[in-house]
Image (cartoon, grey):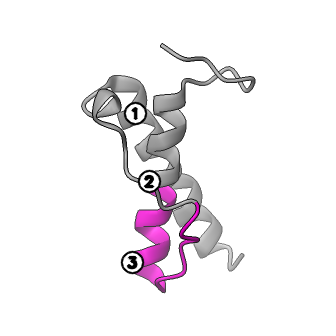
């Protein structure tokens, strides 16, 4: 598993970005194309990827609810 300087795995980060973009694209279609990257095959179905998706979804939902 690749660990990043933040202490998270690369797969977690891919999942987090995917979660953020899912909400942004649903809300108003404004996900930055640089951020909107596919999840690599080796990261699919991994627990850390799934956790990243959940965390990205939650963080973005909360941000949108606060009006940010």
Residue occupying the point 56% across, 59% down: 35
Mark toward the start of the polypeptide (3 vs 2): 2
Residue occupying the point 68% across, 73% down: 66
Q: Which residue is mark 1?
A: 49
Mark toward the start of the polypeptide (2 vs 1): 2
Q: Which residue is mark 3?
A: 26
Assign a secondary structure to mark 1: helix
Between the residue at mark 3 and the residue at mark 2, the CA separation in whole angstroms equals 12 Å
Residue 44 falls left or right of residue 68: left
Q: Which residue is mark 2?
A: 18
From where the camera sits, is residue 68 visible?
Answer: yes
Q: Position of residue 36 (x, y in %)?
A: 48, 62
Disc 2 crowd rating (10 Å Cα; few below 14, some 14-19, many 20+) is many
State yes or no: discs 3 and 1 in contact (Cβ < 8 Å): no
Q: Residue furthest bottom?
A: 28
Residues shaded magenta? 19-34
Residue occupying the point 73% across, 27% down: 6
Q: Position of residue 43 (x, y in %)?
A: 35, 30
Residue occupying the point 44% across, 68% down: 23
Assign a secondary structure to mark 2: helix
Assign a secondary structure to mark 3: helix
């Amino acid at each position: 598993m690749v660990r990043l300087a933040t202490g998270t795995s690369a797969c977690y980060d891919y999942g987090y970005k995917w979660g953020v973009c899912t909400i942004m694209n649903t809300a108003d279609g404004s996900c930055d194309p640089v951020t909107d990257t596919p999840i690599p095959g080796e990261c699919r179905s991994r627990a850390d990827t799934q956790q990243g998706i959940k965390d990205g979804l939650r963080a973005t939902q909360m941000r949108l609810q606060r009006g940010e």
